[in-house]
Image: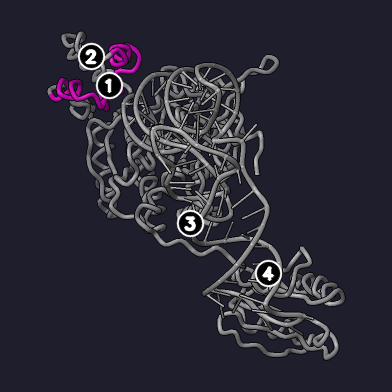
Amino acid sequence: MNTDFQSIKGTFDILPDTATTDGASPAPTTTWRYVERVVHRVMARFNAEEIRTPVLEPTPLIARGIGAYTDIVSKEMFAFERGDTQYVLRPEVTAPVMRAYLQHHLDQRGGVQKLYYIGPCFRAERPQKGRYRQFHQFGAEIMGTADPRADAECIAMMQAIYDAVGLTGLTLRLNSVGNPPSRARFVEALQTYLQPYLEELSETSRQRLETNPLRILDTKNEHEQEILQEAPVLLDFLDQESRAHYDTVKGLLDDLDVAYTEDPTLVRGLDYYTHTAFELESDDLGAQSALGGGGRYDLLAQELGSKQPVPSIGFASGIERLLLAMDAQGVAVPAKPTADVFLAALGDEAERWVFRWAQQLRTEGLAVALDLRGRSLKAQMKEANRQDAPYTLIIGGNELNTGRASVKEMATGEQEEVAFDALVDYLKGRLPAVA
RNA sequence: GUGGCCGUAGCUCAGUUGGUUAGAGCGCCAGGUUGUGACCCUGGAGGCCGGGGGUUCAAGUCCCCUCGGCCACCCCA
């Protein structure tokens, strides 16, 4: 069937089954729900609480929170103006969560706030494998403590989710970008080092030398990588405090048996990071290899106008990429739920009986499927088969006369008669567990 | 944003050097079995050949534009 409309470029519909078409979700709804379920369960184990913030945020929150010179803010935002307000479809959710934390004085609840979220984000990039304009993230923020245990726990939380869905062979890269003074000294050294190579750098790198020097470190340009071989190393510039923090985090990760690879070139894209930075990668994903990442952002709260610092650490993960990796690794996913029983009717009177009983069985908690097109019994049986319902009730003149339903067990083909008033118990007794 | 590849039924794909009413398998619907699915047989529905323009007597086939998809760059989830 044709239509004049289609989903917007880089967005997709999540469909009930794997009728995968170009531009559809990498997985059906059942798989999405499974992943979401795992996220909720694992987060609960870490005693994290769910937070839901609007998809629409004030543009300046994002611009200031993430940094004006980041790619996200400079060219990837879906932003618009209405009246005198600037709106943006959130490109990430750490800044919004911090906004909510400050706006609602969540620190006054006492203790450390451990918050997690699941929801859509938007970025106006050219779509490709694992990259969409509307994509979905889950993540967590541990807010109100600078303790390195929060860093380690945050990373462990992220790792636990991938473990829970059964993904293997992932690489956790770890680095420290230090505190502001350490970073400032390093940036200066880096700029000095790169000065002689100015002519050999790409245009973007030259620009970044002024605006965002750290980002030059994770260039993929081979020549630039060569140049960087001899460049000063970030870790060498960490002051004692930064160094101690980093070492403690590593030790704690060891205690938790969370494996990691140190990568001194790992620099996260967003401005608000301090100290710990990490990223989880998979080689099952093509060019978009990052499953998730995060880091510490002790400066963000004040950047957003808070008088008090709110030292925090968080991670964010992409659901689409998780799904892609699951698919590539052939990870088992629970089958889609089926109806418990299909009600097939023969004749007008039986159709009315079936329609009433469908409702009755549903109030008893059974999942019931039936024909809504007045089709032949044979067609109804075919439908029952396709629906994969373990039992089918066949109701015709005979059944109405005797007051006994024909109940067919689809897997074996065996059929028996059950008195109407015994049906509920009969079915419930045979079905796994009825919710 | 830049580049490469691709775009024929719901899905996977055929479609001869441009040449009658565009095909197959699977799926869907109906019948064979006027009360029974999964197997089998028969039939049917379903395509502005992504859209627009051009070349030509003639375009699914050639050219241009556009939209979309895929992949990569960039960046990140």
Q: The residue under label 2 is which amino acid type?
A: Leu
- Residue A216 is labelled as 1
- CA gap between label 3 and label 2 equals 45 Å
Above or below A136: residue A198? above
**In the rendered structure, which amino acid carries the disc numbered 4?**
Ala
Residue B39: x, y in percent?
52, 74
Q: Quadrant of residue B53?
A: top right
Q: Secondary structure at mark 1?
A: helix
- Quick check: do tags 1 and 3 share a chain? yes
Q: Earlier in the sequence, mark 1 or mark 3?
A: 3
- 4 or 2: tag closer to the N-terminus: 2
Q: Nearer the viewer, residue B12 or A108?
A: B12
Q: Secondary structure at mark 4?
A: loop
Residue B28 location, x and y as percent? Answer: 63, 60
Label 4 or label 1, whichever comes before in sequence order: 1
Decide which of tag 4 and tag 3 comes sooner along the chain: 3
Q: Chain of mark 1?
A: A
* Quarter-of-image position of residue A317: top left
Residue labelled with disc 4: A367
Q: Nearer the viewer, mark 4 or mark 1?
A: 4
Q: Position of residue A279 (x, y in %)?
A: 33, 39
Q: Is residue A292 above or below residue A169?
A: above
Q: Amino acid at mark 1?
A: Ile
Q: Is residue A131 magenta?
A: no
Query: Do marks 4 and 2 both belong to one polypeptide chain?
Result: yes
Q: Residues within 10 Å of mark 2 (few under 14, many from 20)?
A: some
Are callouts 3 and 2 both on one chain?
A: yes
Q: Quadrant of the N terminus of chain A?
A: top right
Residue A204 magenta: yes
Mark 2, residue position: A201
